[in-house]
């Protein structure tokens, strides 16, 4: 929910900035739009928690995933624009620099059995639930 709200807020602020610039008669050739929030999904079932983070264009050497208790941290850097000397940037929206997401997992997990893959700009982290966090069946005695 928070991710959607941040994206909506970002879009509204950009629209307001455009309106103010238009009212002031300011024309811009290019502008950098900071967008340090990257989208993510968290899916949980009886066996594991799966976190998918959109990280297109990152430098894989800077990708870092850490887990402390139930707090998962993902850090990476996006490269600067590839611009040749003499080129003019007309419009730039892709964020550059460090991206960091810190989130609280919905349950305890087993870090030693966790896996992470990066494919087509999406980081997927699979974290098995700790035995203590798995649902348990309670036997009902009928008397």
Image (cartoon, rainbow, N blue to C red):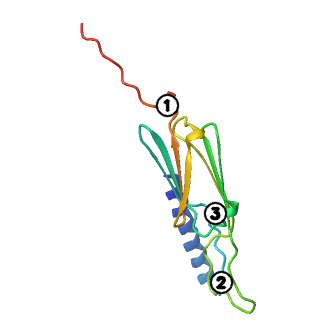
**Cα distance, mark 3 to mark 2?**
19 Å
Does dot 1 land on a helix, a strand or a loop? helix
Quadrant of the image occupied by residue 81 = bottom right
Q: What residue do we see at 54% from left, 66% from top?
A: 121
**Cα distance, mark 3 to mark 1?**
32 Å
Image x and y of residue 35, in percent: 62, 66
Does dot 3 land on a helix, a strand or a loop? loop
Mark closer to the observer (3, 2):
3
Quadrant of the image occupied by residue 16 = bottom right
Total labels: the figure holds 3
Instruction: Mark 3 or mark 1: name the one nearer the start of the chain.
Output: 3
Q: What residue do we see at 55% from left, 34% from top?
A: 108
Image x and y of residue 102, in percent: 63, 49
Rendered-image quadrant of the C terminus: top left
Q: What residue do we see at 53% from left, 43% from top?
A: 127
Instruction: Mark 1 or mark 2: name the one nearer the start of the chain.
Output: 2
| Label 3 CA crowd tier, 10 Å (few <14, some 14–19, many 20+) | some
Instruction: Mark 3 or mark 2: name the one nearer the start of the chain.
Output: 2
- The residue carrying mark 3 is 36
Mark closer to the observer (3, 1):
1
Evaluate if marks 3 and 1 touch, with contact meaning CB atoms under 8 Å apart: no
Does dot 2 land on a helix, a strand or a loop? loop
Q: Residue furthest right?
A: 85
Image x and y of residue 57, in percent: 61, 70
Q: What's the mark number on residue 133?
A: 1
């Amino acid at each position: 929910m928070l991710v959607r709200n941040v994206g909506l807020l970002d879009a509204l602020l950009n629209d307001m900035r455009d309106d103010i610039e238009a009212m002031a008669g300011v024309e811009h050739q290019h502008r950098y739009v900071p967008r340090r929030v990257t989208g993510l999904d968290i899916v949980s079932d009886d066996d594991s928690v799966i976190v998918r983070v959109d990280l297109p264009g990152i430098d894989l050497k800077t990708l870092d995933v850490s887990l402390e208790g139930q707090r998962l941290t993902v850090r990476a850097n996006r490269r600067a624009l590839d611009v040749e000397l003499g080129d003019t940037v007309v419009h730039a929206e892709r964020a550059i620099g460090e991206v960091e997401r810190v989130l609280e997992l919905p349950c305890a997990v087993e870090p030693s059995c966790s896996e992470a893959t990066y494919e087509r700009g999406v980081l997927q982290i699979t974290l098995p639930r700790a035995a203590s966090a798995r649902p348990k069946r309670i036997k009902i005695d009928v008397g």
